Each structure stands twice: as structure tokens, then as C-alpha cells.
Amino acid sequence: MKNYHYLTNGVLEAYLLGLVTEHEKEELEQVLAADETVLSQLKELETEMEAYFLRNAVPPPPGIREKIELRISETEIKKWEQPIPEDSNQKSTESPSTEPQYINVEVDNTYIRVHKHWKVAFIAVFILSKIFLIAGLYYYFKANSLEQEVTRLKAETRQTAPINR
């Protein structure tokens, strides 16, 4: 019954995304070792998530790879490409490095990029706003001229109406 909980409550998704606590992770790994159904579901879910992320991936701006490669030296590249030693599970007696484990990258392009469908929607809203603005101004001036015409006709009827005393 507990395995059903893992299959239906999003625990596997949270595990794949790294959002579970250490206790939940250990518990789930024990269940994965014991139950083939949960393990096969996890593998299937992992495949689906990977395919989704690959379909919706946003490519980096052109030329960014070359900029990164120019900023880092060959020794740093080799350091990052070195395989992890087998005894990496043991705690190191060396003090942890204080330098960050990432590379700062500056981008020259400061333009905001939006999806092509949003561009079309923005253009459509812009054009519609101009149409409604023109229509609003037209009806405003038309109503104003009709009001002036009514005022003129009222004044004219007052002048031509016989005075009854």
C-alpha cells in the first residue's frame, strides 16, 4: 500500500527533481531496491521528464560558448573534466575551497527575448488599441457635434415658437 503512495502522490517526481528530504530519499531508495514496479515507474518517469526538458530547452545565445572558452584557461577545463576518484565517498581532510564552483559569464546582449507567439499577441493588442482609440475619438467628436446640433435646433425652435401670453 505504501508503494502506491509513491506512485500517485508525486514523490517520484520530487525525487527526480531533488526536492525530497534526506530521510525521504533514503526511504525511497529502500523501496526502489525492493519493488520493481516503483523502479520501472521511476525510470519511465525519468525518460518522460528528460524528453520534456529536451523538447522545451532554450538554446543559449550564439557565441556564448566561445566567450566562456576564452575566459577560462586550459588547466581549468582539464580540472573540470577529470573523473571523480572512486574513494570520493570518504570525507576529505582538506579544507573546503572558498572559491566558487562556477564561472562568471558576462553577456553583451541586454535585449529581452520573448517567444514568437508573444510577439504576435503584442502586435495584435497594439493594433487593436489603435483601432479602439480611433473609434473612440470618432464617436466622441460625432456625439459632440450632435449635441451642438441639438442645442442649435433648440435655440432655433425657441426663436420661431410663438410667444403665448
Image: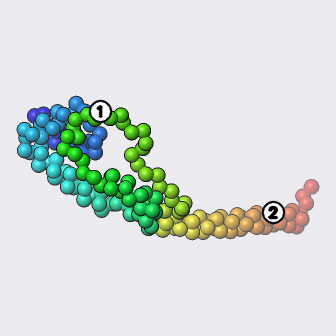
The secondary element bearing badge 1 is classed as loop
- Can you see residue 117? no
**In this rendering, position of residue 116 left or right of residue 155:** left
Which residue is drawn at the image coordinates 71% and 68% (left, top)?
142
Q: Is there a contact, CB below 8 Å, between mark 1 and mark 2?
A: no
Q: Quadrant of the C terminus?
A: bottom right
Tag nearer the camera, 1 or 2: 1
Identify which amino acid the numbered label 2 is placed on: Thr
Q: Residues within 10 Å of mark 2 (few under 14, many from 20)?
A: few
The label number, if any, that marks residue 55 in the structure image: none
- In three-dimensional space, the C-alpha distance between marks 1 and 2, rounded to whole angstroms, equals 96 Å
The residue wearing badge 2 is 151
Q: Quadrant of the N terminus?
A: top left
Which residue is drawn at the image coordinates 34% and 60% (left, top)?
57
The secondary element bearing badge 2 is classed as helix
Which residue is drawn at the image coordinates 30% and 62% (left, top)?
55
Residue 87 location (% of width, % of height): 20, 40
The residue wearing badge 1 is 93
Identify which amino acid the numbered label 1 is placed on: Thr
**In this rendering, position of residue 54 left or right of residue 63:** left
Residue 8 location (% of width, % of height): 18, 41
Query: Of 131 and 23, which appears nearest the observer?
Result: 23
User: Outermost residue, right direction?
Assistant: 165
**In this rendering, position of residue 42 left or right of residue 34:** right
Query: Of 97 and 58, which appears nearest the observer?
Result: 97
Which residue is drawn at the image coordinates 12% and 43% (left, top)?
38
Residue 111 location (% of width, % of height): 54, 62
